[in-house]
Amino acid sequence: MNHNRTAYVILGGLSIQSNLSGYELHKAIEENFGSFWGESYGQIYPTLKRLVAEGLIVPSRSASAPRQRRQEYSLTDAGRACLRDWLAQPFQNDPPRNEFLLKLFFGREAAPGVALAHVRELQNRNRRMLATLEGIEKMARASQSQDPNMPYWMLTLGLGLALTRAALDWGESALQELASTEAVSAQGPQPAGDDPAAGTS
């Protein structure tokens, strides 16, 4: 059976915690790995129906909220086997669609200061991201959780921290480079006679 990756996100989420509704799955995705993966309700709900039809998950009503008639789902043995098959396959990272990099690539056509402003904004976002990730790391280590998933979660978090710190280092260099480049551009072309490197006869 061919599945989109939304299906495996759902199977993975239910492998960690059973009896989750579509809303709870979406919330768990945002809270646990929203920094590197996103799913919309429009992707989750149709996929839940398909997985039920294929026998990979089973529905149940929440006993805690019968009036809301909240539909919850749990993983079946077939669903767990499907998840494990997918985990064993080579990973595929789609080419990213990064508007910041696209605008930076064409930055020569922008007005002076625009590229610098974009890099500063990226720095601010990355500082906020770093603070969030460091807070998660601090809470995770303080909890001393014995959850068997914890080593894998911490490795994932560790890469996020490393990439964010590297991006901040790059940003500082980029700001210096752009400031220098735009300063030279502002001076305009220099007459040949003013070239300090030119020799004299």
Image (cartoon, rainbow, N blue to C red):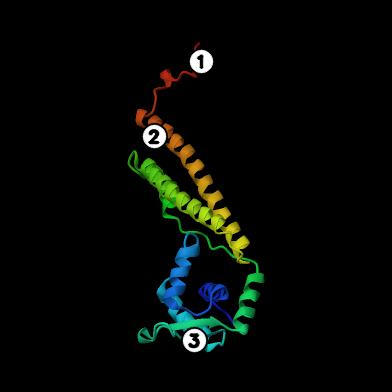
Q: Secondary structure at mark 2?
A: helix
Location of mark 3 (residue): 59
The answer to whether residue 39 shows anywhere in this view is no
Residue 14: image x %, image y %? Answer: 54, 76
Residue 10: image x %, image y %? Answer: 52, 75
Q: Amino acid at mark 1?
A: Gly
Q: Which mark is residue 60?
A: none
Mark 2 crowdedness (10 Å alpha carbons): few <14, some 14-19, many ≥20: some
Q: Amino acid at mark 2?
A: Glu
Q: Specify which label sits upstream in the sequence, 2 or 1.
A: 2
Question: In the displayed structure, does residue 16 sit left or right of residue 115?
Answer: right
Q: Are marks 2 and 3 in contact (CB under 8 Å)?
A: no
Which sits in the foreground, 200 or 36? Answer: 36
Which sits in the foreground, 159 or 196? Answer: 159
Location of mark 2 (residue): 182
Q: Residue at x 53, y 51 (%)?
A: 161
Q: Residue at x 35, y 31 (%)?
A: 186
Q: Is residue 62 above or below residue 133?
A: below
Give the position of the N terminus as an image quadrant.
bottom right
Question: In the displayed structure, does residue 119 sit left or right of residue 79?
Answer: left
Mark 3 crowdedness (10 Å alpha carbons): few <14, some 14-19, many ≥20: some
Q: Is residue 69 above or below residue 190?
A: below
Q: Is residue 40 above or below residue 76?
A: above
Q: Which mark is residue 199?
A: 1
Quadrant in which residue 159 is drawn: bottom right
Quadrant in which residue 3 is drawn: bottom right
Q: Are marks 1 and 3 in contact (CB under 8 Å)?
A: no
Q: Secondary structure at mark 3?
A: strand
**Nearer mark to the viewer, of 2 and 3:** 3
